[in-house]
Image: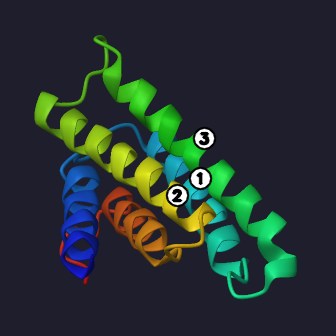
């Protein structure tokens, strides 16, 4: 899983970093949405069974955001390069699969947080950020 974590994070950073100087408003909006849901994922105490509803809500919010990203890149009129669109859609699939594992309590949120953080770095133009 650790290899998948690094690969997904690298893909996320490269995918959004490659978008270049696309319209600032959509990028800043995407960044803000990712930051909000990532903060919720970080705040959810996955070790406390009583906090599970907060974790489930954060996972659902993250899934919906990634579904929106996937729908956007699946649109034939989307102006992003085909390769970038494919990488974003692949990240959506990873997020969906891993979210199920978190909800089944067989995984933690680290991979989801790493993907979101890497995409935020890309959106902010920090392609080479660790």
* Residue depicted at x 64% and y 61%: 37
Q: CA distance from mark 2 to mark 1?
A: 9 Å
Q: Quadrant of residue 89?
A: top left
The residue nearer to you, when weighing 15 against 115, is: 115
Answer yes or no: do the residues labelled 2 and 3 have beta carbons within 8 Å? Answer: no
* Residue depicted at x 22% and y 48%: 20
Earlier along the polypeptide chain: callout 2 or callout 1? 1
Q: CA distance from mark 3 to mark 1?
A: 5 Å
Quarter of the picture containing the N terminus is bottom left
Residue 36 location, x and y as percent? 66, 62
The residue nearer to you, when weighing 89 against 81, is: 89
Q: Quadrant of residue 93?
A: top left
Q: Which residue is mark 1?
A: 62
Secondary element at image label 1: helix
Residue 45 location, x and y as percent? 73, 83
Residue 78 location, x and y as percent? 31, 20
Answer yes or no: do the residues labelled 2 and 1 have beta carbons within 8 Å? Answer: yes
Q: Looking at the picture, does residue 44 appear above or below residue 11?
A: below
The residue nearer to you, when weighing 111 against 98, is: 98
Q: Which residue is mark 3?
A: 64
Quarter of the picture containing the C terminus is bottom left
Earlier along the polypeptide chain: callout 2 or callout 3? 3
Secondary element at image label 2: helix
Left or right placement of residue 30 versus residue 114 in this view: right
Answer yes or no: do the residues labelled 3 and 1 have beta carbons within 8 Å? Answer: yes
Q: Looking at the picture, does residue 67 appear above or below residue 129?
A: above
Left or right placement of residue 68 versus residue 19 in this view: right
Q: Which residue is mark 2?
A: 99
Q: Residues within 10 Å of mark 2 (few under 14, many from 20)?
A: many
């Amino acid at each position: 899983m650790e290899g998948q974590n690094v690969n997904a994070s690298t893909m996320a950073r490269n995918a959004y970093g490659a978008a270049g100087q696309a319209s600032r408003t959509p990028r800043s909006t995407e960044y803000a949405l990712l930051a909000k849901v990532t903060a919720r994922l970080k705040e959810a105490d996955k070790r406390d069974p009583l906090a599970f509803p907060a974790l489930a809500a954060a996972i659902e919010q993250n899934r919906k955001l990634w579904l929106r990203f996937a729908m956007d890149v699946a649109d034939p009129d989307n102006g992003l390069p085909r390769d970038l669109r494919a990488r974003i859609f692949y990240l959506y699939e990873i997020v969906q699969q891993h979210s199920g594992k978190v909800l089944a309590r067989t995984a933690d949120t680290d991979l989801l947080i790493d993907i979101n953080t890497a995409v935020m770095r890309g959106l902010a133009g920090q392609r080479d950020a660790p």
